[in-house]
Image: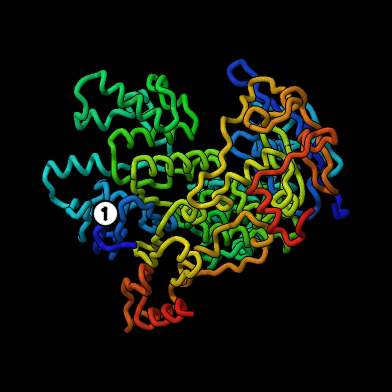
């Protein structure tokens, strides 16, 4: 790590949901440090727990979900212990804001864009009337909406998907949060619009100086935005490191598999690497490494004992028995070796 | 490669209009391309570009307003004979994007897969129908006993396999795949892509692959056509298109795809397409073959410039 302080520290977080009399463990002991000013991408497939994990930072778990154990330290408080809405209102939207995937459902279709932003400015910044309106128009301008004075009076349906997402971002910016969580912010958008939104978030980050968490399954987006990457599988973080560490020198077999199955790394005319099977059922207790049943080269111990986090290098960790000194030496798959060769630092 | 005789599907001057309040909206205009037997042809564009409308016009869910769609040399749009109609219904199949929405929730897999052959009466007795369903399910990597289950019992990847089985049972020649893997997770995408290319090899299928994600399209297609606002802007063999994109819209699209490589991504220069930057007042653009097999929508001046670029 480069000496930056953690702004948010999660330790051994366990999140459970009650569903029809059964208990699902969505997060199974995840720990993570978010560093001040960085952009961290949390990568995982659907059901890996990446959205649930970050929802615990703003108290937005569904009714039937709860933090079972663990801590979330932010500004000297433990968010995991927050129980009342009054406590959460001090953090949610004010200190930690979130941008969701679908800008259509995030906005109220019956209220003008301007009023929706103004409302947040009034609530969180203590402005009112004309002053709040001007602040809202300034925000629209800041997120790149042309002709903000006219657009202020319009309704969400008069905006395109990309423009709507800009509005959602303006609302998130309204109270100058310290952390911005972007949950698949561009999945519903076209690639050219996506590129513009990613660029906008970067520009705002350098203007406002917040810390960003991206949640995404798109490794191209991760490569574009992330300083650091956390890979999630079955409710756990299995690897964290700088973007360079994770893309050019990944260590966890799941990270290998995920990268290898990208068409960009495939060879045309040959079958693409694919992960067999499906992720484990989180209603059941999981023994050992959760990825072992889908990993054709799993070790015997992977089925018996959950691997701890091993340190690969400063800032790069992975939870796999392959990093244990007693483990047999195993070469990563060809696609990963090819990625490593592309890294200008060469062999590491 | 092409001698003009191996065209399975040919589209000439296709135009599709939709009625809107107070007039017509032209979703697709002036579209020309052909698909060779056995190839995978990619049609790439952003939402609202008209790419899906072209696919739907081919299977005749959307009606062509003018122009011609030829299948094995015979016109299949407009009025056609009943024999040709049932042949087209069978030989051109479609796979849809969202496997959650495209399967009838109330029907069992058995019915979903055999609906096409039931409609066309393509089996002699119940035993033959069951055998066909079983064969189709096995071909897409599903178990025959899945036939008695309902769609909600399956994962996204399995549902997409059901969608593929339902088209395979018709023994199609051309399969129109409309964003078949966009709704799937990365690891499941690879499985479905592999299945599609295995089936192509074993059955000699021809694919029209409609997608917005150029990185996936690059991996599986032989040729790509890029569509913007209802018009094709460029068409070339896949690697040629990536190596020498000519039209500014293609360049913008290529520059916008995120690549899973942090160093390349940080160095990347984003190109923004500005249609207003070009002057078409006197010199009108047309669909032009710039080099053998490489087409672009260009006016005379642009075509000359593109040829210079390719010659370099």
Can residue A270 be seen here? Answer: yes
Front residue of A115 and A233: A233
Where residue B162 sits, quadrant-wise, is top left
How far from the left and from the top, in percent, is residue A1? 85, 51
Farthest top residue in view = A21
Relative to A75, say whether A198 is above or below: below
Query: What residue is shown with label 1?
Result: B9
Q: Measuring 65% from the left and 20% from the top, which residue is drawn there?
A: A284
Q: Measuring 29% from the left and 61% from the top, which residue is drawn there?
A: B26
Relative to B162, say whether A76 is above or below: below
Host chain of mark 1: B
How far from the left and from the top, in percent, is residue A290? 69, 29
Q: Is residue A187 left or right of residue A3?
A: left
Front residue of A296 and A4: A296
How far from the left and from the top, in percent, is residue A100? 59, 46
Can residue A175 be seen here? Answer: no
Q: Secondary structure at mark 1?
A: strand
Q: Number of callouts in the render? A: 1
Q: Is residue A134 left or right of residue B133?
A: right
How far from the left and from the top, in percent, is residue B271? 55, 69
């Amino acid at each position: 790590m480069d000496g930056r302080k953690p702004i948010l520290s999660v330790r051994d977080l366990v999140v459970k949901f009650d569903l029809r009399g059964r208990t699902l463990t969505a997060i199974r002991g995840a720990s993570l440090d978010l560093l001040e000013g960085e952009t961290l991408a949390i990568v995982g497939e659907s059901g890996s727990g990446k959205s649930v994990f970050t929802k615990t930072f703003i108290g937005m778990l569904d009714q039937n979900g709860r933090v079972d154990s663990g801590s979330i330290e932010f500004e000297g408080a433990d968010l995991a212990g927050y129980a009342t809405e009054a406590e959460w209102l001090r953090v949610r939207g004010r200190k930690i804001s979130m941008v969701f995937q679908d800008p259509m459902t995030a906005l109220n279709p019956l209220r003008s864009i301007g009023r929706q932003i103004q409302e947040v400015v009034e609530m969180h910044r203590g402005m009112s009337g004309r002053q709040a309106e001007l602040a809202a128009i300034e925000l629209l301008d800041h997120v790149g909406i042309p002709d903000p004075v006219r657009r202020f009076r319009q309704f969400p349906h008069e905006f395109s998907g990309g423009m709507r997402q800009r509005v959602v971002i303006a609302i998130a910016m309204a109270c100058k949060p310290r952390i911005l969580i972007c949950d698949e912010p561009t999945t519903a958008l076209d690639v050219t619009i996506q590129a513009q939104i990613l660029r906008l978030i970067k520009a705002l980050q350098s203007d406002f100086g917040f810390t960003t968490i991206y949640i995404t399954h798109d490794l191209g987006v991760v490569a574009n935005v992330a300083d650091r990457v956390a890979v999630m599988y079955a409710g756990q973080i299995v690897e964290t490191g700088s973007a360079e560490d994770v893309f050019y020198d990944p260590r966890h077999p799941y990270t290998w598999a995920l990268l290898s199955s990208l068409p960009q790394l495939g060879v045309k005319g040959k079958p693409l690497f694919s992960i067999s099977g499906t992720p484990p059922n989180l209603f059941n207790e999981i023994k050992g490494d959760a990825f072992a049943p889908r990993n054709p080269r799993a070790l015997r111990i992977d089925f018996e004992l959950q691997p701890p986090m091993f340190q690969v290098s400063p800032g790069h960790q992975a939870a796999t028995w392959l990093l244990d000194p007693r483990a047999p030496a195993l070469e990563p798959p060809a696609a990963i070796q090819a990625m490593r060769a592309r890294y200008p630092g060469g062999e590491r | 490669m092409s001698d003009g005789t191996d065209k399975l599907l040919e589209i000439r001057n296709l135009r599709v209009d939709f009625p809107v309040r107070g007039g017509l909206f032209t979703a697709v205009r002036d579209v020309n391309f052909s698909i060779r037997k056995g190839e995978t042809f990619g049609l790439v564009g952003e939402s609202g570009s008209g790419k899906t409308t072209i696919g739907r016009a081919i299977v005749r869910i959307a009606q062509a307003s003018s122009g011609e769609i030829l299948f094995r040399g015979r016109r299949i749009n407009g009025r056609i004979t009943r024999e040709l109609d049932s042949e087209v219904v069978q030989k051109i199949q479609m796979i849809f994007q969202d496997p959650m929405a495209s399967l009838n929730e109330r029907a069992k897999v058995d019915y979903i897969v055999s609906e096409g052959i039931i409609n066309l009466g393509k089996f002699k007795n119940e035993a033959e129908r069951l055998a066909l369903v079983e064969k189709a399910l096995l071909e897409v990597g599903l178990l025959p006993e899945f036939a008695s289950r309902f769609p909600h019992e399956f994962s996204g990847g399995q549902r997409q396999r059901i969608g593929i089985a339902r088209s395979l049972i018709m023994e199609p020649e051309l399969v129109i795949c409309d964003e078949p893997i966009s709704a799937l997770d990365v690891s499941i995408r690879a499985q479905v892509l592999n299945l599609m290319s295995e089936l192509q090899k074993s059955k000699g299928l021809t694919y029209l692959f409609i997608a917005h994600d150029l990185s996936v399209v690059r991996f599986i297609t032989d040729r790509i056509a890029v569509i913007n606002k209802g018009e094709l802007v460029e068409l070339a063999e896949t690697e040629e298109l990536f190596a020498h994109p000519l039209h500014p819209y293609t360049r913008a699209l290529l520059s916008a795809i995120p690549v899973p490589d942090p160093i390349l991504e940080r160095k990347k220069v984003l190109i923004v397409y500005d249609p207003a930057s070009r002057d078409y007042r006197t010199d009108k653009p047309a669909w032009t073959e710039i080099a053998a097999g490489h087409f672009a929508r260009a006016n005379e001046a642009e075509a000359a410039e593109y040829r210079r670029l390719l010659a370099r």
